[in-house]
Amino acid sequence: MAVWIQAQQLQGDALHQMQSLYGQHFPIEVRHYLSQWIEGQLWDAIDLENPQEEFKAKRLLDSLIQELQNKAEHQMGEDGFLLKIKLGHYASQLKSTYDRCPLELVRCIRHILYTEQRLVREATNSSSPLGGMMDTMSQKYQQINQAFEELRLLTQDTENELRKLQHNQEYFIIQYQESLRIQAQLSSLSTLPPADRQLREPTLLSKRATVEAWLTREANTLQKYRLDLAEKHQKTLQLLRKQQTIILDDELIQWKRRQQLAGNGGPPEGGLDILQSWCEKLAETIWQNRQQIRRAEHLRQQLPIPGPIEELLNELNSTITDIISALVTRYLPSLLKTQTKFVKATIISEQQAKALLKNENTRNESSGEILNNNCVMEYHQTTGTLSAHFRNMSLKRIKRSDRRGAESVTEEKFTILFESQFSIGGNELVFQVKTLSLPVVVIVHGSQDNNATATVLWDNAFAEPGRVPFLVPDKVLWPQLCDAINMKYKAEVQSNRGLSEENLVFLAQKAFSSSSNNPEDYRNMTMTWSQFNRESLPGRSFTFWQWFDGVMELTKKHLKPHWNDGAILGFVNKQQAQDMLMSKPNGTFLLRFSDSEIGGITIAWRMVWNLMPYTTKDFSIRSLADRISDLNHLLFLYPDRPKDEVFSKYYTPPLSKAVDGYVKPQIKQVVPEFATANSDPASGNPTYMDHASPAPVNHAHTYSIYPPM
């Protein structure tokens, strides 16, 4: 969405150029309301000149239409009604326009994005960080594509040179055969009479001398052709290795890093389409060059000429095999799509993973027994992907190692080792491929889930690329941790409303037992793993993470709409709540997360500072909105919003009157000190005189109140 934000700030001619990009073929409203989604897709990964790529374009078109329909359905109010109709119309219009030619949609959007980036770049002179980032990304992709084009031309050139060499060598062999024929004729002259021999010998000797001189010159020429070809192959392989390093050591590692962050709730790591496209081009180019080198080797064997070419060809063969090995063992190309291969999954420990990456002999040891751990890899023609689905895999047994110091079982990391064997070139090259999953934690009971989640979150957030398995820093800067838990919170709650700076200050106060309200005081502070989820908070029986995880679970399961509405302040302590409410009228209340109970939320209001916290168990009986509705003394949500304005849309509809002679009971929440309100039966309102209820539910704990401060 960032490019679109900057594009809207264009002025003058640049603004007119930007606006002219849009029309009925692609409405500007679609660009506006789906800007984040549009900028998050890999439009460059689709080859517009390849008709087989049409299925990828069709998937993007279908996703675009679905996103538009979703956006339309979530519009509310009078203005939202009109926008809902308009966006729905655009969805139908785009489907009608591009359904039969989805590649044209890709071409259209790619042109729009390129032009917007150029206009923004020209307007800012690439001075803004965002403009520079987008420019850098475009340049990087352009450099990769240019390198592929250079490789294509080099490979085509060596192919032409190889054919030329083969043609010249074939002619050389013909002439060599001619020289042998002349020599045979000269040898046969000894059987002729002297007169005939003297007549024919000079001609044959002259012819032999001419042919041998030509053969000597041509042998030198062939040798030069062979050396020139080998040098060109060396240049090609150098560029191939460089290109492969960029793709596998830079782009693939960055994708794996995004995969880690996605595990913490970050943006999706993105498809592998563009990486797959690059790797397939690499594989195709590598294989073409390998076949050329093997043909050159065959020509050398067919006509041995003394010189350094044999050593050069051996070196080229070794280099191209290394390049192939690096590619297929780190990214399986489409070379496998015609083969049926099995993948085996094994669980191994951190120490075993270290030994594996050091190429030490692990003797196929595992740290547990996995049932149904073999699966067939399948190539899917429609999506161009090679995948294995372990549908019924389960862990039967785990073997734990000796833990270090205070380390618990939920801090012990394992990984799934995936192994396969395959060949290419008709069993010419056989490869053993292995790859490791992201670290996993094995638990035996749901009570261990939050601590195991903490281990995985810390690893995903702070692991360095290329680390030794599975080393992570023991302490990190507080702002780094804030980014990680904010990402996780938004993902778990499924909300665009993340943690504000005030929320993060509250968390810092809790984490560091500090009273400072200044965010700058925490910028350079570090938090250790022990502080995060090993040591209990002062005066509590739980850690910082356990408390925070409880908040996430409660919000995710029961409070999500209220959090999204901004009705829950949440991260406020008792004293802050009291200070905020002191200047407000009686009946003003706010909602804050409990400091003393994991996964609890309490109501603080002007007359009663804090009700005993509600938990998931309470909300499974009666929702937060209904509980607020039950308490007539709650009038205004802090600072001054009438409670019904905020919560009424979530109230449970009143029960209809019974027609069979029975009155259905219902549960109501009361606070004893305020239970006499509206107690006149004639008023038609429910009485709160007592808590007698036909429903066998005990609410005693919800009546307790903290003493007024």
Image (cartoon, rainbow, N blue to C red):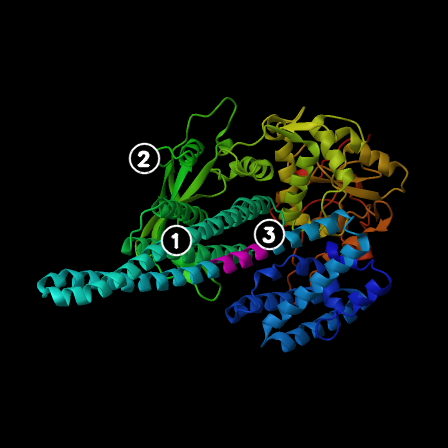
Earlier sequence position, callout 2 versus callout 1: 1
Judge the density around disc 1: few (<14), some (14-19), many (≥20) Cα neighbours within 10 Å.
many
Earlier sequence position, callout 1 versus callout 3: 1
Residue nearer the viewer, 701 or 589: 589
Horizontal side of 10 relative to 245 (left or right) equals right
Can you name the residue that lies furthest to the front here?
195
Alpha-carbon span between mark 2 and mark 1: 45 Å
**Residue at the spot of label 2:** 363
Judge the density around disc 3: few (<14), some (14-19), many (≥20) Cα neighbours within 10 Å.
some
Alpha-carbon span between mark 2 and mark 3: 37 Å
Give the position of the N terminus as an image quadrant.
bottom right
Answer whether residue 536 is visible to the viewer in this image.
yes
Q: Label 2 sits on what residue type? A: Arg
- Mark nearest the camera among 2 and 1 is 1
Q: Based on the displayed image, in which of its 4 quarters is residue 189 positioned?
A: bottom left
**Residue at the spot of label 1:** 226
Give the position of the C terminus as an image quadrant.
top right
Q: Was residue 385 drawn as part of the magenta stretch in this picture?
A: no
Q: Based on the displayed image, in which of its 4 quarters is residue 84 positioned?
A: bottom right
Q: Label 3 sits on what residue type? A: Pro
- Mark nearest the camera among 2 and 3 is 2
- Residue 108 x/y as whole percent: 67, 69
The residues colored magenta run 145-155
Element at label 1? helix
- Residue 371 x/y as whole percent: 35, 46
Q: Based on the displayed image, in which of its 4 quarters is residue 302 positioned?
A: bottom left
Q: Was residue 151 drawn as part of the magenta stretch in this picture?
A: yes
